[in-house]
């Protein structure tokens, strides 16, 4: 979500990728391939690199299997393995009470807040149909969560889809657990222990079940939730990242490519206060600030996360936090032509980092390869506005994405491994 839209709305109240060390070294000379090589796909939604094709799965306003209409502003999304060769997409909708959509009196009884219109939908898609280019790839679709505000990012977890509210209006500002098998809207399941702040993304360490949480503020923090034990995943302690020897530092302003900084964690004693003070209390304890933390993904024992307006030019940074607690800046955008304010991020099964842009139109999808090159995979061909929701099918040959302002969810099929090799 751009700061421009937030201002208009008046909101007040690394992976250790394959060859991980080489990515760090080669990121110092990362470059973007010319976008002139992209071509228009038949659906007209993207300009794509050679060998890739795009399938539109649905659009806002389409009728879903539960009789409801697809909400607008699709954002963060996660892909889960479903039954009989199906893939399940859990998709956020970044809506506020005054956005278009159902009136409050139309909200079901299961709504978290009947005045709010954000939430989560579920798409069950046929992976074989997508790979073969056949029509009718969507098997079913339905609403799962409603009555929330600005469901922006989120993340996959052992307990289902984690949907994050990027709003701290009264009664909001939480992470919600959504069942990937729910065939109709269900009662909301907020997790207060994950904190109450302007959430963006969640990424889970599969080994420890620690949950890393980003905060979309110009002085936001990176948080970590440590569960009490694996049988009680939503009970435990919340912490904020600090840089050893530099309490309260602005990490986005001071990070330089190649630097390796050891981190520590400071406790958050009241994770869900009534006021929006979690980050300010964390900063008093020495937590580092980052400029608009948004997308995050966890793979191979490390976390990759994005500071959308970080860096000397304010155009975005890609950080990696290793399992050993070392923070490294992998890439910093220096001009809009190369990379314009990355937002969502996903790591491919073989370790390339895919970035969705939310900056100067036309926004697209870029790939930071294992060799440190920055390649153009796609450019939005409709409004050119924010691309979101990046997530891979397990085999890595299908990349799902959302064109937020256009209200469209797509599947991009192609040779991803050879594209970045």
Image (tube, grey):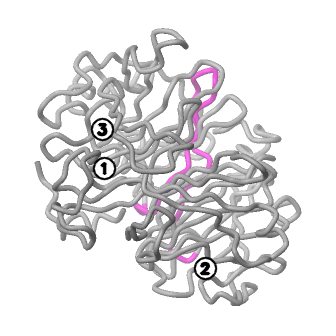
* Mark 2 residue crowding within 10 angstroms, few (<14) / some (14–19) / many (20+): many
* Mark 3 residue crowding within 10 angstroms, few (<14) / some (14–19) / many (20+): many
Label 2 close to label 1 by CB (< 8 Å)? no
Q: Earlier in the sequence, mark 2 or mark 1?
A: 1
Residue in the foreground of this view, choosing between 21 and 140: 140
Q: Which residue is disc 1 drawn over? A: 166
**As drawn, is 84 to the left or to the right of 297?**
right
**As drawn, is 345 to the left or to the right of 36?**
left
**Residue occupying the point 43% across, 69% down:** 70
**As drawn, is 140 to the left or to the right of 343?**
right
Q: Is residue 255 above or below residue 419?
A: above
| Image quadrant containing the C terminus | bottom right
Q: In the rendering, at what x and y percent does residue 318 appear? A: 55, 50
Q: Nearer the viewer, mark 3 or mark 1?
A: 3
Q: Is residue 337 above or below residue 232?
A: below
Quadrant in the picture for residue 254:
top left
Residue in the foreground of this view, choosing between 276 and 147: 147
Question: Judging from the image, what secondary structure is the residue with disc 1 in?
Answer: loop
> Magenta segment, which residues?
313-337
Residue 379 numbered mark, or none:
2
Q: Earlier in the sequence, mark 3 or mark 1?
A: 1
Residue 174 numbered mark, or none:
3
Question: Judging from the image, what secondary structure is the residue with disc 2 in?
Answer: strand
Residue 72 numbered mark, or none:
none
Regarding residue 259, the answer to whether it shows in the image is no
């Amino acid at each position: 979500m751009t700061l421009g839209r937030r201002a208009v709305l008046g909101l007040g109240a690394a992976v250790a990728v394959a060859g991980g060390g080489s990515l760090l070294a080669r990121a110092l000379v990362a470059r973007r391939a010319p976008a002139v090589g992209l071509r228009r796909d038949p659906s007209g939604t993207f300009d794509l690199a050679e060998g890739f094709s795009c399938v539109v799965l649905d659009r806002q306003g389409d009728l879903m299997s539960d009789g409801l209409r697809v909400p607008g502003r699709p954002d963060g999304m996660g892909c889960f393995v479903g039954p009989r060769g199906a893939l399940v997409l859990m998709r956020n909708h970044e809506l506020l009470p005054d956005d278009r959509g159902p009136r409050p009196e139309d909200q079901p009884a299961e709504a978290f807040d009947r005045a709010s219109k954000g939430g989560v939908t579920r798409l069950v898609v046929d992976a074989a149909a997508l790979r073969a280019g056949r029509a009718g790839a969507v098997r079913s679709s339905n609403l799962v969560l409603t009555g929330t505000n600005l469901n922006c990012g989120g993340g996959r977890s052992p307990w289902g889809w984690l949907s994050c509210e990027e709003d701290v209006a009264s009664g909001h500002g939480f992470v919600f657990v959504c069942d990937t098998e729910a065939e109709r809207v269900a009662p909301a399941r907020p997790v207060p222990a994950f904190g109450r702040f302007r959430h963006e993304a969640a990424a889970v360490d599969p080994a420890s079940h620690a949950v890393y949480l980003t905060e979309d503020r110009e002085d936001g923090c990176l948080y970590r939730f440590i569960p009490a034990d694996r049988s009680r995943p939503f009970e435990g302690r919340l912490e904020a990242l600090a840089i050893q020897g530099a309490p309260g530092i602005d990490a986005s302003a001071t990070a330089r490519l190649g630097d390796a900084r050891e981190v520590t964690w400071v406790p958050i004693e009241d994770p869900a206060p009534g006021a929006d003070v979690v980050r300010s209390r964390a900063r008093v304890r020495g937590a580092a600030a980052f400029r608009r933390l948004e997308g995050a993904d966890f793979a191979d024992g490390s976390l990759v996360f994005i500071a959308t307006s970080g860096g000397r030019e304010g155009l975005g940074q890609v950080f990696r936090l290793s399992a050993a607690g070392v923070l490294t800046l992998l890439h910093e955008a220096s001009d809009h032509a190369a990379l314009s304010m990355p937002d969502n991020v996903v790591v491919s099964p073989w370790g390339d980092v895919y970035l969705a842009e939310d900056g100067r139109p036309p926004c697209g999808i870029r790939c930071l390869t294992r060799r440190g090159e920055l390649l153009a995979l796609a450019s939005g061909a409709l409004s050119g506005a924010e691309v979101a929701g990046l997530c891979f099918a397990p085999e890595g040959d299908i990349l799902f994405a959302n064109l937020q302002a256009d209200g469209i969810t797509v599947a991009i099929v192609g040779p991803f491994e050879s594209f970045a090799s």
